[in-house]
Structures are given as structure tokens and as C-alpha cells.
Image (cartoon, coloured by chain):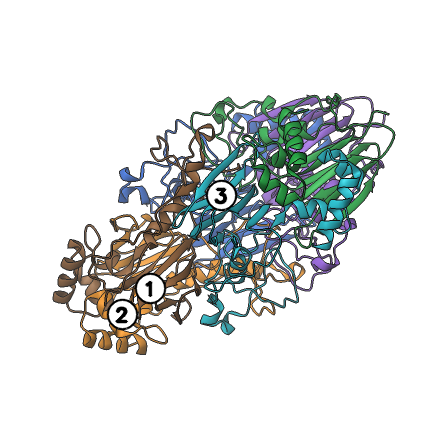
Chain colours: A cyan, B brown, C orange, D blue, E green, F purple
Amino acid sequence: MASRYFFVTLFALVISQAFGSDPSQLQDFCVAEMNPQVFVNGVVCKNPNAVTANDFFFPGLDKAGNTNNNLGGLVPPHYHPRATEILVVIEGTHEVVFVSSTNNQLFKKILNKGDVYVFPQGLIHFQFNRGWTNAVAFSGLSSQNPGVVFVANAIFGSNPPISDDVLAKAFRLDKKTIDRLQAQFTSGN
Amino acid sequence: MASRYFFVTLFALVISQAFGSDPSQLQDFCVAEMNPQVFVNGVVCKNPNAVTANDFFFPGLDKAGNTNNNLGGLVPPHYHPRATEILVVIEGTHEVVFVSSTNNQLFKKILNKGDVYVFPQGLIHFQFNRGWTNAVAFSGLSSQNPGVVFVANAIFGSNPPISDDVLAKAFRLDKKTIDRLQAQFTSGN
Amino acid sequence: MASRYFFVTLFALVISQAFGSDPSQLQDFCVAEMNPQVFVNGVVCKNPNAVTANDFFFPGLDKAGNTNNNLGGLVPPHYHPRATEILVVIEGTHEVVFVSSTNNQLFKKILNKGDVYVFPQGLIHFQFNRGWTNAVAFSGLSSQNPGVVFVANAIFGSNPPISDDVLAKAFRLDKKTIDRLQAQFTSGN
Amino acid sequence: MASRYFFVTLFALVISQAFGSDPSQLQDFCVAEMNPQVFVNGVVCKNPNAVTANDFFFPGLDKAGNTNNNLGGLVPPHYHPRATEILVVIEGTHEVVFVSSTNNQLFKKILNKGDVYVFPQGLIHFQFNRGWTNAVAFSGLSSQNPGVVFVANAIFGSNPPISDDVLAKAFRLDKKTIDRLQAQFTSGN
Amino acid sequence: MASRYFFVTLFALVISQAFGSDPSQLQDFCVAEMNPQVFVNGVVCKNPNAVTANDFFFPGLDKAGNTNNNLGGLVPPHYHPRATEILVVIEGTHEVVFVSSTNNQLFKKILNKGDVYVFPQGLIHFQFNRGWTNAVAFSGLSSQNPGVVFVANAIFGSNPPISDDVLAKAFRLDKKTIDRLQAQFTSGN
Amino acid sequence: MASRYFFVTLFALVISQAFGSDPSQLQDFCVAEMNPQVFVNGVVCKNPNAVTANDFFFPGLDKAGNTNNNLGGLVPPHYHPRATEILVVIEGTHEVVFVSSTNNQLFKKILNKGDVYVFPQGLIHFQFNRGWTNAVAFSGLSSQNPGVVFVANAIFGSNPPISDDVLAKAFRLDKKTIDRLQAQFTSGN
């Protein structure tokens, strides 16, 4: 069995390239200038006179992403600080889960081909391949720059690391376990 | 040959059901109350205590839409007054075109499987099946209520109709042609 | 009879010069820098220390605009992708019409001196001089850069042109008529 | 000489009735429900099915306003907490002035027929009839509910009144003068 | 030693009661109606005619909060999905840390009386009492409803729980440890 | 007796340095670039790669501000055009007052240690030390650039000055008194 997740990160990139619609648009379009000399909240735009149809185009979502990792069909718990996500299942059986910020209520669904699900902005969620085939889905994110925080990586793999006494207390684990987790998540193993 | 377009309207419905993200979210989620007693700018929300996982779920995007119409593989020129659209091609060869509001500049691209394209908010665009197979794509729209104005229908099929002397002058057609168009677009033929 | 429309474009220019209020203002004012070195969503501002009272001033709305065109008292069907318009009649008898995006419902009114009308953002509308005198009105637009799409020009006069097979199908006209319209709208005749 | 100012308040009313565009519009239009049962930030909307062309219409800007007051051609210093104002002069000679919040810099201009001026949101401004004829202008305000604070009335005519020891200290006037001003502004004399 | 944190939750409550400023204000104020019959994005407002000075008032920030918990001077890792936080230290020595969403970069500072720190919206952060006295701070949050997600509680204490096979894989812990953590965080021990 | 007000201006500075949250954030943070070469609505950001923990840090709120002025414990009537203010009392007895824009209704409260009060955006307000000790409070403002207009200074101390005939009429004072006030407020005495 080779359970997999494709495209999640890739697709965010597409939107971030050409959407520019978080605040109201004040012109027909703002194509991101990729080498800005000036930094603003969001992207600086390319000169509109230099924009062509290719700036609205992104190929390759029919190519499988690289699934050579040790997660085995799990997009682990994460959240997008600046975007709601909408997911369409292309193939496979997906468990989708998010947890609300009110009483940590969990919302869960099993999705199959043609099913759509929404993960509200800022809430922790994950997708898990619960079937025996590849799992493929497209994700749309409602921001030019949604951001992504993988919870385990932010907590145990930050640079520099969080003090292990803080993490031991917060996660009710002994320091030795914390140190082992920090070593693993920091090295990217 | 049976060229077709699927899902465009359908998908907009999904987003309109559960997105609620045009203005910043002021709570975890706002699921649209479908029978509101009060009208506001946008949707009134369901009582959050009555929300379940099904409110974030929409099935059926694997079912072909009804293409039994006389447009023959064309989603005719239209615009969304309140949303940018992002389109992912699942199958077929699509001509995608939009016209900017500055000098009526036309942006055009031929898309195939796995290609993505963006139509900026408020600009007239269309998709046309340029191949010999079905054309299938998913569209995401950046608003809970994107709206759609099909140009020919709004101009020639409004209710009540626009005076034919106005349309004859604006479109440089004789009144008889205008009357024929109005009859066709009004009846939905 | 010389029916005319004045000022519509002119007035939009004024607002675009000094308003800067689409998103919330984050400073007292943002006067548009007319030769920007950097492009953002909206305008870059002049150095506030160089701003004078003249930056908030625009003269000449008492001068008649140029009405030497072949439209004969019609501001033809168009929409503003980024602004609601409010119109005050100064002189003459004006037919004002807009079409909603819901069922193409038409809203129509005859206006005389002192009457005010509102065209909602993104909806197709037109003004027509229904009287025997000049028709003069002031229009305010709710954006620094409202944009304007004249429907017939965007459809038949884009650069490069839309394929005539698409337009013939969408507008239910034969290709010969489409070609004649494209020739006329492209040349600006 | 009968110097006068017309329409300023009147025109704000028009916009407040039908604009509804401060935040992005999430539907074609939101016509204010005048007898709301529920209060939200801004207006509750009429049921869209009950909206007619008259909801976008406001007559009577050709009728002179009532100028029977003791201000003699002055719209005294005031500001709009939620709107930028754009003013078009129809008749007369107007002194227009605003004061920025940075170093209290004053911006001043004399306007005549056809001149336009902009007062930025939240800054104190006034208009004064500097000529020997009526002064007439139209004002557009960039909010459904711009608000207006006439400075002298808010300071000396609040209900209940501000303590006279505070005002004496803040305005460097003796308490007796403060008491006289409070009596005048409170009674509306 | 009794290290403690006060007021964080309490202060959020104050802002949520009367701020109403996430989107632009469309009226002088919107005081939250605490028993709404209708749900919108954010709060429904009290009838403005019923608003008094007490609606803008909140007492008691001089009273120590209840610190009778098992966290021992730690506000454990959490984030606010809808608000940036600004913190002013009143007493004690505070370690403040947040982790960015770009490469999990950690930003850390030791704060003492009179120091101010900012935690950007949506980023995981914590405060830890690094001294031998009480630690007291005031926190302001930039939303009427900032939300708070305590990471360990959302992950290990959701209701219903996340499958232990998912958590074991995501956090690289054995299922037995996961089960123990879930038991602890769910019971609130 | 030495009644005093501390920190109001100081604290606004802190927020203006690092908040950047008036519109939705489109990235983790935008730290203000203090020597911008380009001007936009709001601040230009520092290169995110150059940001350190110190950019989120501001010390010194435990130091008393300079109260060597002639206002004697009064923060005189003023308003913030772009921010709501929330105030926490640290020490002393404070009279807090604001005046609404609807009928100039006055809202007043006496605050003591631990009390919180909110001044809505754009409304005239003041704080007065009504006790016999120092009065200390922290103020948070909901904008990166709230702005402040001290009413008496804007009216009587603008540069250049407002014509004394306008002020005499608006404030019902004789020109001699107006001239005296203008001399005082202009010189900063």
C-alpha cells in the first residue's frame, strides 16, 4: 500500500502568485512581483504593462507530488493563520478533521471522490488516507499568503528550540521524551 | 463530439454555503442560515450550537452536470461582480479568455489537464471547449456570493426588457435584429 | 436637438486623484503619486510633506465636456467593477437603468433636475437623454479606481479580438455580423 | 446679502439610504430597513424581493434648503468620523478649510462654480460663504453613515454638559464665559 | 514560590464586550447584545438607545485571578486565530516566545516591569514566569472575538478525541503515551 | 498636589511600531520601516529577514512621563480619527467622558484602580484627574496610526490660523477673545 497526499502545498503557491484578493482589489489585478525592493503588507505588484496571460497560468497539477516522506498518507495536524481551505477529493478515501476553538469540538467526515469539505480559517485540521489506494485532492485557500503552521514542527522543531522545561510542563511529558522529539523534528527526520 | 462544461455553478454553491470569509471572520465559522428572518450584507449564520460536520460537506462533484443546452461547449461571456475565479482543468482542452478594463486588453490561454488559470474579479471572461472530448474543470470563487452576470442575457434578456432604441444604438444593430435577440434571450431558447 | 452627457469620466478622475478611501485610511490622507516607481494594490502616495491644498482641488466641472461622438445622448451599457455610483441630475430628462445579477431584473427611472439615483457596484447600467435639451449630471464613484467596462467595446472591440465563432454562438448572430461589429468597435468608429 | 449653504445634511441622508458599500458588498445591494428589529454594525437590509427602483431614487436636490439660522453662511467647524467628503460647487464663492492631525496644518482654498474639493475622513473642516450671493454645493460622503460632530456643539452643548472647570482649563476661558457658551449651545439659540 | 499569571482571559472578555472594531465601524458604537435571537459574523448590537456609560466600563483588573491550577506559572503554547496581542508587564520576570510560520523561527525575550511585547496574529506563543515572584501582565487583543487555541488541549483533549493512530504518527509517540495524554487533557487534570 | 497623566502618547507609539493589523494581515507581521523611500496607505515594512525579537519589544512604561505642563491633570478634549481606545487605570481617580455624534449625548464614569473604559473611534473624549494623587493609566489604540486631534489646538492653534471672523461666529466669542486664544494656542503657552 502506498497511501499519499498530493498538491496541498503546491496549490497554495498558485493562489499566492496571482490572486491578490484578500483586501478589496483596487485595480484589475495585482500580479506578485517576485523580487521586491520594497516590502508592504502582502505583495508588491508587477508593472501592469508587463503582465501577460502567463501570469494567470500555472501548469502541472496532473503530476503526482513527491510522497517520499515518513508520514505515510497523513497531512499532519496544522492550521492556516490567514485562510479558509476548501478541499475537493479526486481519488481515494480521506478522513478529514478539524477542531474548533470553542471547547475543542471535533468535526470529522470520511470523504470519497467528488466530495468537498471546508476547513475554517485558523483551526487545527488534518487529512488522513484511510483507504488502500492513493489519496488525491485539490485544496483552494482563500488568501494570497495563507501561511501554514504544522503544530508538531512549530512546537518541537522551532529554531532555536523552545526550552524543554516549558514543553515538558505544557505537554505533560518528561524532559527526555521532549529532547528526543526536539532532536527528531529539528533534524527533519 | 459532445463538448461540455461541468460544475461551474455547482461549485459556487458550495462555497456560498460554508465559506463566509469575504470580510474577516469574527468567529470560527458562519454557516449560512438558509431561511433568514433578517437580511444583512451577506448571510445570517446558523446558531453555532446547531452546526455539525455536514455543514462543511458537499458531495457529488464526481457526477457529470447537465449539458443538455444549446451552447455547445461554451460558457458564454460573463463576469462575477464579487469574486476572482480560479479554475483547474480535470479533462479536455479549454480556451480561457478574459478582457481587462484597461483598453479592453485580451488575455488568452489554451489549457489542458492539470493547468490552472485565474480570472480576476469583475472582468468579462469565457471558457470554450476547443477539443473533441468532454471538458471538465473545477472553479473556485473567492466570495460567499460571487454573483454572475451573463452579458448577453443581462443585455438582451432582462426583465422587463431594455428599450430596443437604446440597444440598437449601443450595439450598432438594427431594431429588428435587437427584437429577435430579445425574443430569444428572454424566452430562454 | 443636441442631447448630451457630460462629466461622467471626468468626475471619476477627481475621486481617483485624492480619495484613497477604499480600504480604511491609515493616515490623514494618501494623495496619489502619479509616477510611481513601485506598484501596489491601489496607489502609492505622495510624500505627505509635499502635499498642498491643491492636491485636494479639481476645477472645471462647470465646463461642458466634449460630446462630439456618435452616441447621441447615450452613455451606453457599462459597469464599474469596483464602485457604486451615485448620480445627481443638474439639467435635462434622464432615463437611468440597471440590471441586477439575480434573474436579470431591470430597475428603471426617469430623472429630472435635482433627482438622485444609485447604480450598485458591478451591475450593468446606462443613462439615456430622453429629453430635447442637454442632459447634465454629476456622478460620484465609491472607489479611488472604479474601473469601467463598456460591454459592447469589451466584447466586440477587445485587443486582440475574441474569436468570431465564440461571439456568434454567445450572441446568436451570424459570423458576418460579428465581423462587421468587431471592425466597427475596434476602429473606434 | 443672504449668504447660504444648502444640502449638506440632505445629501448625506441620500447616501445613507441606499449606498451600503462601506465594507465590500456581499450581494447586489443592501437597501436600509428603516424599522429594524435587530441591530448590527451598519444597517439591516430590506428583503431583496421587496426592493424597487424607488429605493435607489431620491428627489428634491433642486429645492433650496432652509437657511433660516443664525450662522450666516457658515457651515461651522465639524468633522465626519466615518467618511471622506467630496464637494462640488454649484454657485457662489466658498472658502473651504481643513486642519490635518499632524501639527494642525491648515489647508485652505477659495472655490467657485465647477470647483471640487476633498475633506479627508475625520479631520475638522468648514465651508464659509465669502461672496455676496447664495452659496450652493453638493457634498458626497463615502459612508452609509458618515456621522457629523459639530465641534462647538459637542464641546459646549453636550447633554448632560461637560463640567465647566474642565472646559475652562481646556479652552483657557473663565468659567463665566464657559457657562454663557453652554447656555447658548444647549438651548440651540 | 508561587509563580502566577493573571488576567489574560479576563481582559479578552472586556474587549469582546464593547470593542466592535474589527471591520470598520459604521456607527458610533456597537455594544454586544448578549442574548441574540439572530446570529451574524461577529456580534449583534444592543439597541443604541439603551446604551449607557456602564456598557463601556469593566471593573476588577486590580483583583488577582485564580491561579489554582497545575501549570505553575506557564501560559502554555497557544494562538489567537483572529487577533494580535499586545502585553504590558506590571510585575515579575516573564519569558515571552512566539514561533513564526516561516521556517518555525523562534522570537524570544525576557520582560520586566514596564516592558511591552507583541504576539502577531495566528502565531503560537507562550508566557512563562521566570522569576521568584508573581508575574502580572495586561494583554490587549485586536479583535472583539480573538479566539484562543491551546495547542495541547486541541490536539490531545478534543471532543470527541482524535484517533490515536493519527496522533502517534504525527507526534512520533507510541499509542500508549498518546492514550495517557488524551486521558489527562480530556479530564482537565 | 501634583495630578498627572502618563503614557497616553507613549503607548500609541508602541502600537504604531509593530502592530500593522488595521487591514487583515497578509503575512506573519509587518514591522514599520522607519525611513521609507516609498509612501503607501499605512507603513512600509522592514525586510522580514531583518526582523528580530527586539522589533516586537518596547521598554519603559514603568517610567513616569513628563507632566511638566500647564494642563494640571487634564488630557483635554480630543479624538482619534482612526482608533477606538481602551484604557486601564493603574492608579488614581479618573473622570472619563466621551460625547456621541448622535445628539451630543455625554457618557461619563469615575474610574479607580483596575477599572477599564472604552472610547469609541472618532468621538471627542477627555480624562481628568479627580483625585489628590497621581493618575496613571495605560491606553491601547486599535490602529497602527490612530491619529490625535486636540480640539482646542486644531481650532485655535492651526498653522496658518483660521480667520478670526469664522471662529468668532462659530464659537460665539468676540474677535478679541479669539485673537487672544489664537495667540496662546499657537505659541504653545
Residue E82 visible to an observer of this rendering: no
Give the answer, above or below, for where E120 lies relative to F130.
below
Q: Three-letter amino acid code at disc 3?
A: Glu
From the viewer's perspective, tell me whether residue E170 is left or right of residue C58.
right
* Amino acid at circle 2: Val
Please tell me in which quadrant of the rendered image residue C76 appears. Answer: bottom left
Contact, mark 3 vs mark 2 (Cβ under 8 Å)? no
Q: Which residue is mark 1?
A: B126
Element assignment for label 3: strand
Q: Do we see residue F63 in this rendering?
A: yes
| Labels 1 & 3 near each other (Cβ < 8 A) | no
Tell me which corner region of the image, top left, top right, bottom left or bottom right, holds residue B153. Answer: bottom left
Observer-nearest residue: D34 or C18?
D34
Q: Please identify, in this view, whether the residue under mark 3 or under mark 2 is nearer the observer.
A: 3
Find the distance from the CA under tag 2 to the CA under tag 1. Answer: 9 Å
Query: In x, y percent, where is residue E18?
Result: 58, 30
Q: Viewed as shown, does residue A96 lie left or right of B154?
A: right
Q: Residue at x 18, y 58 (%)?
A: B185
Residue at which label 2 appears:
C166
Q: Is residue B149 left or right of residue F127?
A: left
Give yes or no for contact between labels 2 and 1 (Cβ–Cβ under 8 Å): yes
Q: Position of residue F136 (x, y in %)?
A: 78, 30
Can you identify the residue that label 3 sits on?
A95
Write down the chain letter for disc 1.
B
The amino acid marked with disc number 1 is: Phe
Residue in the picture at 78% in, 44% down: A179
Q: CA distance from mark 1 to mark 3?
A: 36 Å
Of tags 1 and 3, the one toward the viewer is: 3
